[in-house]
Image: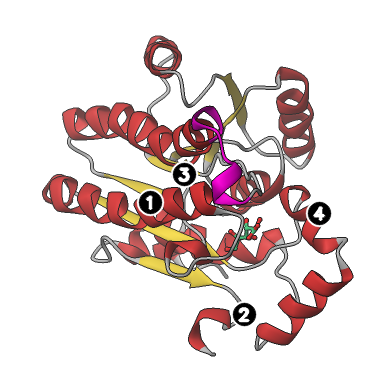
Amino acid sequence: MSHPLFDLSGRTALVTGSSRGLGHAIAEGLAQAGARLVLNGTDTERLALSAAALRAKGHQVEEAAFDVTDEAAVCAAFARLDAAGIEVDILVNNAGIQLRKPLVELSMAEWDKVLSTNLTSAFLVGREAAKRMIARGRGGKVINIGSLTSEAARATVAPYTAAKGGIKMLTRAMAAEWAEHGIQANAIGPGYMATEMNTALLDNPAFDAWVKGRTPARRWGRPDELAGTAIWLASQASEYVNGQIIYVDGGMLAVL
Ligand code: GCO
């Protein structure tokens, strides 16, 4: 029997970047707990496939294709949700990209792209969602997706590291301003997960061995292993948890 504290029936969850990878898995977990989904991505074909796969499992799914880095597009998307009577109670700021390159070779444009996709997007989508949550007076949930790089750096991923460090502090800033409105803003910090974004790392035998050696669990994480934490942070069960980043990393950050 499911516990009522974790029941998301009657709630609507917008998950950015949910046509694949961690976003899709988190969305599926929230739907299994009862939430209606609003999936987001920029590739409308992939988004439609992701939505169809979840509908086939009996979940209620809307599609909202918009670019999370484009302020006008974000505002227009929320206006369309308003017009359709769709109220976002749970926002998961998951959209993210990676770019692996030594710092001294990075262009300004590359830096800006990673920062805007991985950090500024959470501010933009978070602002639009929270404005509405505050106006409705029913509170809400914001879950930002951090990373191990919210805490520790790794060579060749500097803009990603800076953005994910920013996500940790943006989460706290959101909690500082929105907690009094009944909104909980927390983050999930996934460890090394077997996703499409990490294909190059998974396919590199030395990196694969490093991850397995460095992680107490001795393996990569599976995207669906984020679902439990996402459901908890999206539910009434976490009503007094605010500004935290929860690492789901097989123990990696806990050890040297
Ligand atoms: C990397 C990876 C990161 C990590 C993740 C760890 O290049 O280090 O692509 O995305 O997998 O963020 O938390």
Q: In the drawing, does residue 114 fall left or right of residue 120?
A: right
* Residue that badge 4 annotates: 200
Majority SS type along the magenta span = helix
* Element type where label 3 sits in the image: strand
Name the kind of residue labelled 2 in the image. Gly
Q: Residues within 10 Å of mark 3 (few under 14, many from 20)?
A: many
Q: Residues within 10 Å of mark 2 (few under 14, many from 20)?
A: some
Which of pointers 3 and 1 lies earlier in the amino acid sequence? 3
The mark closer to the camera, 2 or 4, is 4
Residue 80, can we see it? yes
Please give the range of residues in magenta.
102-110
**Is residue 205 or residue 79 the one in the foreground?**
205
The mark closer to the camera, 2 or 1, is 1
Residue 106 lies in the magenta stretch: yes
The numbered disc on residue 250 is 2
Q: Are marks 2 and 1 in contact (CB under 8 Å)?
A: no
As drawn, 7 above or below 177: below
* Residue that badge 1 annotates: 167
* Element type where label 4 sits in the image: helix
| Identity of the residue drawn at 77% across and 20% down | 45
The CA distance from mark 1 to mark 4 is: 24 Å
**Is residue 70 or residue 223 the one in the foreground?**
70
Q: Residues within 10 Å of mark 1 (few under 14, many from 20)?
A: many
Residue 145, can we see it? no
Name the kind of residue labelled 4 in the image. Ala
The CA distance from mark 3 to mark 1 is: 12 Å
